[in-house]
Amino acid sequence: MGNSSWGNGFHTGREEGLSEGLTEGRTEGLITGLIITLVGSALTAFGGYVFGKNGGARGLIEKIRGKHKKVIYDVIADAKGNNGLVLLIGDKFKIIKLDGDSVKIEKVGDVNNPYFVSRQFLTSISNFN
């Protein structure tokens, strides 16, 4: 009987210890999860505010690329493009869209707009850089 009650006491104590450990572990896990959620929410809200002011990530990229859209460039050397574009000294053009080396332009006063040319082509014949 002595061994039996000692065994039960040990068994019960071990179960209580496990139960307390699990409860403490759950509590710590909940607190950690709550902190991570709050920090993540704050960062998301801040990022949304920053990007929202600029029209989102796409708006920010367009702002960087769009700096050329307001500028009218001057042609400083006569040139012909492969797509029927003829640029003469003194002609003017605007950038509509940049995509890597490909540039979509609008020649001022031309009814056949737009034209697609390479960035290298434009830098070689105008004040575009």
Image (tube, rainbow, N blue to C red):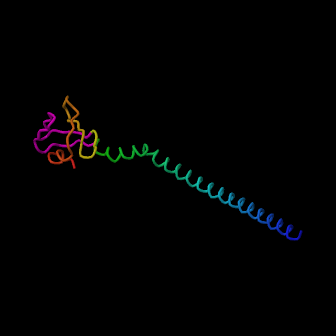
Q: Quadrant of residue 69?
A: top left
Residue extent of the magenta highlight: 70-95
Q: With respect to residue 10, does 113 lie above or below?
A: above
Give the x, y percent position of residue 120.
18, 47
Q: With respect to residue 16, does 80 lie above or below?
A: above
In this picture, residue 32 sits left or right of residue 129: right
Most distant residue in the bottom direction: 2
Marks counted in the figure total: 0
- Of 17 and 33, nearer the camera is 17
What residue is drawn where x is 34% and y is 48%?
64
Q: Quadrant of residue 76?
A: top left
What residue is drawn where x is 57% and y is 55%?
39
Q: Quadrant of residue 125?
A: top left
In this picture, residue 69 sits left or right of residue 73: right
Most distant residue in the left direction: 78
- Of 117 and 110, nearer the camera is 117
Instruction: Give the quadrant of the N terminus.
Output: bottom right
Most distant residue in the right direction: 1
Q: With respect to residue 18, does 97 lie above or below?
A: above
Q: Give yes or no for residue 79 being in the magenta stretch.
A: yes
Most distant residue in the top direction: 111
Q: With respect to residue 24, does 3 lie above or below?
A: below
What residue is drawn where x is 82% and y is 67%?
7
Give the x, y percent position of residue 35.
61, 56
Give the x, y percent position of residue 82.
14, 37
Q: Give yes or no for residue 3 being in the magenta stretch.
A: no
Give the x, y percent position of residue 56.
43, 44
In this picture, residue 31 sits left or right of residue 111: right
What residue is drawn where x is 66% and y is 55%?
30
- Of 25 and 85, nearer the camera is 25
